[in-house]
Amino acid sequence: MTTSPTRRLRALAGVAVLALGLSACGGGNLGSDDSGENFPDGAINLTVGQDPGGSTDLIARALANPVSDDLGVEVPVLNRPGANGALAAKELASKSANGQELMVMNLSLVAITSLTVPEDDAINLEDYTVITGISEDDYVLVSNADSGLNTIDDLKGAGALNYATTGTGTGSQLSSALLFQLAEIDGTAVPFDGGSPALTAVLGNQVDVASIQLGEAMPQIEAGTITPIVTFAADRNEFLDDVPTAVEEGYDVEVAQARAIVGPKDMSQDVVDQLREAFTKAFETDAYTSFNEQNLLRPQELDGDELTEVWNQSVETYRQLTEEYGIDLGSTE
Amino acid sequence: MDFAPVIDGFGVVLQPENLLFCLIGVTVGMLIGVLPGLGPAATVAILLPITLTVEPVTAIIMLAGIFYGAQYGGTITSVLLRLPGEASSVVTVFDGYAMARQGRAGAALGIAAIGSFVGGTIAIIGLTFFAPLVASFALDFGPPEYTILALLGILLVASVGSGTLVKALIAAGIGLLLATIGRDGFTGSERFTFDVLQLSDGIDFVPIAMGVFGLGEILYNLEDRNNNTKAPTKVTKVLPSKAEIKQSSGAIGRGSVIGFFLGILPGGGAVLSSLAAYAYEKKCSKNPERFGQGAIEGVAAPESANNAAATSSFIPLLTLGIPANATIAVIYGALLIQGVTPGPQLVEDNPDIFWGVVNSMYIGNVFLLIMSIPLIGIFVKILQVRAAILAPITVLITLIGAYTIANSVFDIFLVCLFGAIGYLMKKVGLEPGPLVLAFVLGVLLETALRRSLILFGGDPTGFIGRPISGTLVAILVAVIAFPLIAKLWKSKTKQKELV
């Protein structure tokens, strides 16, 4: 079988054109008008900087449906995983601020990951428009139920311990590192790749304790396979009201994961208001409130200014604490 | 054990709605399995909102169907187009693609479908009777055990394919180097990322596999075209012959058992299972030189293994509440949204869901077998399409597939880059298989090794001190030493004969 060279060229050209078309689609739309009159103009992309299936992804999907119903346009959730979400955030910053491009931003990306990466890669909240806060997710320190480690005093008396974290630059790492430092417990961090492997390591007695998000730990706590020692929240969690906070135990460690909806910088106030209203309605739906209860998420449905203030406070606190106690989140020690 | 809930589970599955959603699930799974890139994890995530409108058990039956259905579909592109969509089907490419080039694509796909069915079914039976027993097996595997397993896997990589040992090791070495790209997960420092943020999490498996296998092959064939007037591959027969089925029956059985056990291990179980099943068949075979040249056992074993592994990977989720891989993590999320807590109490609190989902897999596998046999006849016709038409379409599918992994144009460029690398490798006679497999296992090896050393306080003798990892170390030593001793023995007896 032989084909003429021109046909071969044509076929190649076809592929090239299609490839170009694809890359153009990924580039985002620039140059649309910024006033709120024509908003929304087609689908609103809700980007998630993590893989499908994680807490952030599930939250985005729980919100996308009711928001889509309210605004009458599609709200597809796009996963753009990479660098704890920094990849998605960097791309969002360069997109048009017309309200069609949004993202679920994690507090840990702004406040903790930024402490571990070069300054150029750090994500600052001031480079974005905050639409609304979403919810807070507590961290809890757990041990294997058979280990006999039930309180911080048990940990102190146990000698050298290994603790699993859900990764470098996460709230899990920060919370346990701070607690171990303040309580003068001899501990070594073992970073795992997410909450589920860290939990597995505790269940399999590979490590002694781990700080993981409450929603992920709850099924095992209910089954009695792991013991919650302390939470790192400001107040006791209503679903776990017999478990003290680290602060109550005398160690000033308050670390939580929080999430917010953000868009590119300088969005028009009108568009922000329309979006905030749509999300507020979504927060009030029965499906969403029961989703929060099911996942033990505490609503933090603040407006842009309030949220920015709260988050900036966390950024400052985390920075001070890590400096004060010489905690290097970039290394395993 | 009490069998009443097991039987009740069948009652749940046989409700018309559940049967329908099971069929939808496996059909969607098979289709997305055919398309490389858009994997089952993303598909399940996209379909989550739909599942809210049905009963929890119906939803999970459908989502599980997508997951194991995708394993069936993935074989098709591996055999026909040399495009392995998942790490666990890389091994199938060696003999599957060789068979396709000999006009035996139908036989390869047929035996893969039968092997997948048997592997899946054996694993469901294992899941039904032994789930709680074997679940603790997953927990006993900590970082040290994974370290030795990954090391064993990398050694097995050398036995895969048809090239020489040295060339396989060179390719595997390149794969291991590629695995080091990205931000170090332990210290946070950048490695070979050249300030490109897209590289900070390392490279995904799909662009590498699509590039070095699929695109590399197409580029190589383009060059070959003018002096090689080979007609489109003739498809002689569509289904495997009785002799071929008989020849692969042992491989299917052994592959299923290997797949069942390795599949229980969260993270990396599926890849290791197909690799181990293939290597085992090659070792046992009376004429191992056929492997890589179109040996039907070389398709039957890994395909049975990866389907058995896909099924048994539900065990940690259903009995412990631990998702074993990305797709099952999304299914975990779906259960939570439905108000069902996956975990140790699932089988007691929600027996209808537990047994409904488990039993739906029997039915789903039957659906898949019934669907795939007639479809093979249609799929193999792809090979009769002229290269001038097929090649650009394949390239397009590859590029779209790469884009859909993370909605990233960067991955499209990566595919092109690895396509060029694949082409050069083929030029100098290096096989892509060892590179890709070593890449996947390299990531596992590095993280597991470093975690282990932290746990051991830096003392490497810790590996010997644990029962399972100690046993694995012994197997590792045996695997390395046995061929060497055999060689020495041979040369000694030869010398004696000479005297």
Image: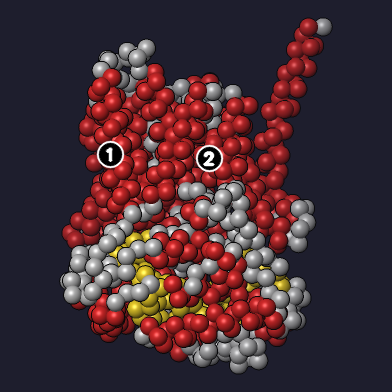
Label 1: which secondary element:
helix
Per the rendering, the mark at residue A17 is 1
In the rendered image, the quadrant that contains the C terminus of chain A is: bottom right
> Image quarter for residue B72?
top left
Q: Chain of mark 1?
A: A
Density class for disc 2 (Cα within 10 Å; few <14, some 14-19, many ≥20) is many
Q: How many marks?
A: 2
Q: Amino acid at mark 1?
A: Val
Per the rendering, the mark at residue B111 is none
Q: Horizontal and vertical percent for residue B144?
A: 66, 54
Q: Horizontal and vertical percent for residue B28?
A: 26, 50
Q: Horizontal and vertical percent for residue A305?
A: 40, 85
* In the displayed structure image, the side of residue B353 where residue B423 appears, left or right: right
Density class for disc 1 (Cα within 10 Å; few <14, some 14-19, many ≥20) is few
Q: Amino acid at mark 2?
A: Leu
Query: Residue under circle 2?
Result: B437
* In the displayed structure image, the side of residue B200 where residue B317 appears, left or right: left
Q: Residue at x 34, y 31 (%)?
A: B80
